[in-house]
Amino acid sequence: MERKKSILFWAITFGGPVILGIMMGIVFYSGNSTGIFPVVWMFLPAAAVMIGQLTAKRKDDGQVKLPKRFIITFLATTVVEIIVSCLAFFMDGNTVTLIGNFVFMAGSVLSLIFLLTEKKETRKAYGLSNQKIGKGIIYILIFLVIYLIIATGPVIVALLAEGEKVTMESLGITTAGILNAVSLPFMFFLTFLPYFGEEYGWRYYLLPRLMRRFGGRSSLFIVGVVWGLWHVPINMFFYSPDTAVQSILTQVIACIGFSVYFAYAYMKTDGNIWVAVAIHFLNNNLAASFGGGDGSGKEYSWISVAIAAAVYIILLVLPFIFSKTFSKANTEAFVTRMLTPAVVPDTTQAVAAEPVDATSPVTSSISEEEASDETFSNKD
């Protein structure tokens, strides 16, 4: 069963981009906008995981049932996004992107409704619960500070070196950008689905499986490289067609840095996927607040690649990679928690047996376990 899921994950997560990459290249060389394709891309990792969950042979083994309404809604949104991307062959690419945005917004709302109406034990069993949210907010804010340093630090240094004055305009910050930043907490609930699509694949599924085989810190770099190379067609036909090689290298470097911090925040919150989703959402959307737009059509120099490497290593890798969070003991505990199937407690034997006193240790331990919000196990 696990082997089948693994094959499906790699086939869909990387096979999909091969097909979409060919489509993207055709659209690009036809002179049309390719903006819809990065959105579709983001759905693939989670779609692969969910298809594996649905197609796995399931017997009446007492395991917690799948959140099928949430899964079906996500997969349906993915299919519709793929269909919409095909319209780029016949329609204006910007219009197609707007249609795709509407689709994933509708999918986000429906998915959120179905998720919130699932049983708590179901959300926990499949890595969808929102435990340790207080800590999660702290890690989100820490990333926000790091992002601001990454976005403005090199520009400020360059301006000061040239004797120029640092202004909002020179930093690329506009009134529209500020309004965009303020709206992000509200927009998250309308647009979270693509970001969940990546994080559920990379952090929930792939990370613990790599950690089981390669250990903690090595797995962070493997995920980062895999994640970065997964973007290659997007770098070629969207982010930076004129400097694709430099863009790809920058992408891999950035993904290694993000892999370290995202995993750090994810593990510190006992596998709260929504913390990673929120951080990913901020990273992708704050660019508009600094004049970055949608990230397309950029040009990278080898100097910018070197600067990116230094910045990501200093701010995202070195401060966290040596944390005890990634120690052997903590990694093993995390892997066990994530990969142990969750089962519904069997109460039939207790009913058939003779009555147990309410103050007995057995009854007390069961009550404590059911009451604990920190109990967190996952099923593939």
Image: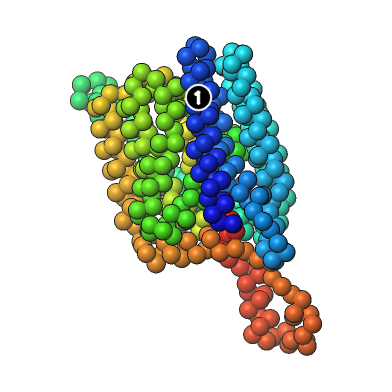
Closest to the observer: 264 or 286? 264
| 127 w.r.t. 16: above or below | below
Q: Judge whether residue 190 can be spotted in this image.
A: no
Closest to the observer: 317 or 234? 234
Q: Secondary structure at mark 1?
A: helix
Residue at image position (31%, 50%) is 319
Q: Quadrant of the N terminus?
A: bottom right
Residue at image position (66%, 49%) is 54
| Residue 125 percent coordinates (x, y) | 62, 59
| 224 w.r.t. 369: above or below | above
| Residue 343 percent coordinates (x, y) | 65, 66
- The residue under label 1 is which amino acid type? Ile
Residue named by callout 1: 22
Left or right of 157 on screen, residue 337: right
Task: Give the colouring mode of the picture.
Answer: rainbow
Left or right of 80 on screen, residue 312: left
| Image-quadrant location for residue 16 | top right
Q: Quadrant of the C terminus?
A: bottom right
Left or right of 191 on screen, residue 291: left
Determine the residue located farthest toward the top in the rendered image: 31
| Residue 340 percent coordinates (x, y) | 56, 64
Residue at image position (67%, 75%) is 367
Residue at image position (44%, 22%) is 237
| 175 w.r.t. 338: above or below | above
Closest to the observer: 293 or 23? 23
Decide: few, some or many residues near mark 1? Use Cα within 10 Å; few <14, some 14-19, many ≥20. Answer: few
Left or right of 152 on screen, residue 33: right
| 39 w.r.t. 325: above or below | above
